[in-house]
Image: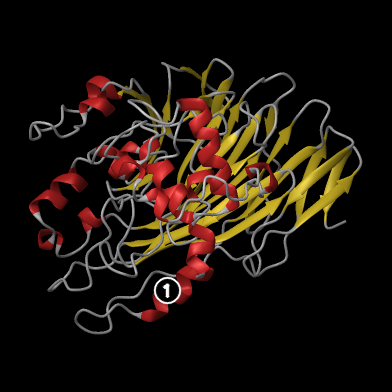
Amino acid sequence: TAWLEDAKLRTTYMLTSDFADPLQWGDEEHPRGVGLYKVQGLSMLFADPVTNDLVHTLVALNGATGAGSAEPALNGARGFLRFDPYGPRVSRTTLPLHWFAAGQGILSARTSWEADASHFFAHFPQDAECGYVDHTVNYHGDLMIYRKGAWALTHPLGYGGRPNIGEGTNGMLHQGWGTTMEFRSALVHQVWPDAHYLAGTVGGDVLPSKFYDPPPHWFHEWSRSVLWIPGEPDLLVVFDRSHVQNPLELPKFTRYSVAHRAKMEAAFALRDTTWHVPVEPTISYAPLRVSWPDAAITLLDDRELLIRDVTTAWPPPPPVPAGMPSEPTMMSERRWQMKALAHEPVDFTTALTVIMLGDPTGFDLRVPAPTAGVRSVQVIRAGQPDLVAVFNVMPGPQTKPRIAANTWDPANRTMLSAVRQCTAPVTVSWVAEGASTELFLPERNRAVQRVRVAGRGPQTYPT
């Protein structure tokens, strides 16, 4: 019953505000396909006042019958088991602007229900507690934004292939791996009227627990924290914590499969943060920035930058049976891929990225002087308060090996669930350009503290 109360919102929240696009993750049988007959049939079956209203809205937009219409599957027979066309209707505008589906780690959040709204879509998949699920994905921490009727930050979609792994998403790879099998979770989601925070962690064994004589653990932690500040422009502050060893240099490398060894040996770097942009971007330096019209990705770390046209860089997909959708749909989506490569042979490091989407007038970034245990970024916006986001850079311990055959150490889950938490006092100093500063402090007890600091000029928190 509790699940149904949340699941009935899916058809409403997984469409963009202009009804033009679905929100989709990797491994999509019909990439960029709204699938109106599925949306309509499922909405009818839920028989909820909000989904009732959605049914009528989609029929008004697309028609009730015929090709391309909102006619549900099986000529509507299934939908009408529960749907009453004269039943109560409640506008979706009465719902909250965000929806977090915890089971799949999906966040759908928007600035309004108007057609030109900014729409933030994030996917931090959880552990597959019930075993294999069809169309499950092998990545973590994917981010996309739809604004003013178009995708401003997105990536190729396909039926299988690269969009099902970290290589084809806006995520991070570690020696070619986009996630682990032992632990992955979206642990914190916070909402303010003008901001969203989402954070998750993966770590532990990359191979199944039932794997004989496995190689040692090397993927100890990758945490991603994301702060979305909607508006003009839309801002994403992305902080990645990475604690890994190079598996090529550890014992028992030959215990990996041939395919796994090939993937790791072909990796661009030990750490590979990937973003996809809609057109060929321009690169600038100091700071390192990739930009295209009304958009920019700024990397606040010293990393090698690689730009690739995936239309030609990715190999063609294998042939598929006649009548089945295939990866060419994905390959026809021309996307430029930006790879930020970190080659340093250290076990623990961090990466801080700011993405700006929209009018850049009055937009600027500064990096406050580092203080013990944290790093931060200051965002300056004309006519608005400054924004300072602060993150914990204290490394956690390495994950522990199995305690027995086929049994992961439960201490790993406990450690990874709390590894981002800041336990020491935090001091931050910056020079405020605006009349005040919105300060977002590192997670403590699985919550970010937000503080408003008044005044221009040099500032220190706590005072």
Q: Residue, x 88% and y 56% (percent of image)?
A: 463
Q: Residue, x 46% and y 26% (percent of image)?
A: 62
Q: Is residue 221 left or right of residue 318?
A: right
Q: Is residue 383 left or right of residue 307?
A: right
Please provide percent x and percent y for residue 346: 40, 53
Q: Residue, x 15% and y 31% (percent of image)?
A: 317
* Observer-nearest of 433 and 444: 444
Q: Residue furthest front?
A: 86
Position of 168 relative to 193 (above/below): above
Q: Which of the 4 image quadrants contains residue 222?
A: bottom left
Position of 452 relative to 232 (above/below): below
Q: Residue furthest bottom?
A: 404
* Observer-nearest of 414 and 198: 198
Q: Is residue 391 left or right of residue 21?
A: right
Please provide percent x and percent y for residue 40: 43, 41
Secondary structure at badge 1 equals helix
> Would residue 395 be visible to someone looking at this image?
no
Please provide percent x and percent y for residue 35: 36, 36
Mark 1 lies on residue: 413
Q: Dot 1: few (<14), some (14–19), or many (≥20) neighbours within 10 Å?
A: some
Amino acid carrying mark 1 in the image: Arg
Position of 432 relative to 392 (above/below): above
* Observer-nearest of 168 and 368: 168
